[in-house]
Amino acid sequence: MRAIGSVLLSLILVAGAAPAAEAPLAPLSRLAGHCWKGEFAEGGSWDRHCFEWAYDGKFLHDKHVVTGKRAPYGGETFYRYDAKDQRIAYHYFNSQGGYSEGNVRPAQNELHFPEERYEQGGKSMVLRTIWRFEGETRMLAVTEQQKDGQWVEAWRIAFSRE
């Protein structure tokens, strides 16, 4: 009887567990199920991202909110696997009407977001970002913007997992 109880308990725990990542999204799994909060390098503004698997692990959903000196706003990103191009793609939308999409290139302890065109209100800018993981609970995000043919740092945030 004890063995049956253990089996039933195991089935209940498995049924309630978060969905596993689809294999192509596995490089994003360290983000899932956690919130990450960081202060912008200039101080006084914070960005908080919360990541959850969606649709049985076929997508990763990231909901973020910026507070402090920078105009408060939020946004959502959905990450998916693009089978045709065999890469991780994302689609970002924010509360100010901004939109961008691009791809993610996993590297050892990093996620690279190469050139993306961010559109808002008829204006656009070209950005690129690298997320560098420092262990399991810290991440540095550095975003650069293309200006006059040169890449310049736009912002930097040191995140900690909550």
Image: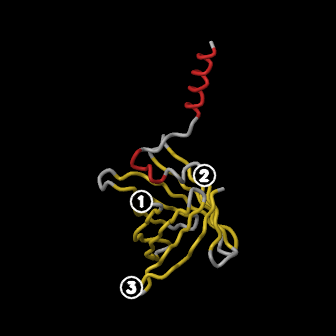
Label 3: how many residues lie within 10 Å, few (<14), some (14-19) or many (20+)? few
Left or right, 66 with reference to 149: right
Of residues 45 and 12, the one drawn nearer to the viewer in this rendering = 12
According to the image, label 3 marks what residue?
Answer: 149
Q: Secondary structure at mark 2?
A: loop
* Residue beneath disc 1: 106
Q: Position of residue 98 (x, y in %)?
A: 51, 68
Closer to viewer: mark 2 or mark 3? 2
Residue lying at 46% horizontally and 77% vertically, measured from the top left: 123
State the image coordinates of residue 91 (x, y, percent, origin top left): 45, 59
Could you tell me how far apart the alpha carbons at marks 2 and 3 are, in whole angstroms?
A: 37 Å
Q: Residue 38 is drawn in which quadrant? A: bottom right
Residue under circle 2?
34
Residue 155, image quadrant: bottom right
Position of 70 with respect to 110 (left or right) is right
Quadrant housing the C terminus? bottom right
Q: Are marks 3 and 1 in contact (CB under 8 Å)?
A: no
- Say which mark, if any, is on residue 12: none
x and y percentages locating residue 115 in the rendered image: 40, 71
Q: Earlier in the sequence, mark 2 or mark 3?
A: 2
The three-letter code of the residue at mark 2 reads His
Work out whether mark 3 precedes mark 1 in sequence or the reverse, and give the earlier one.
1
Residue at 40 percent of width and 69 percent of height:
114
| Secondary structure type for disc 3 | loop
Q: Tell me the distance, in whole angstroms, between the alpha carbons under discs 3 and 1.
A: 26 Å
**Element assignment for label 1:** strand
Can you say whether 150 is above or below 120 in the image?
below
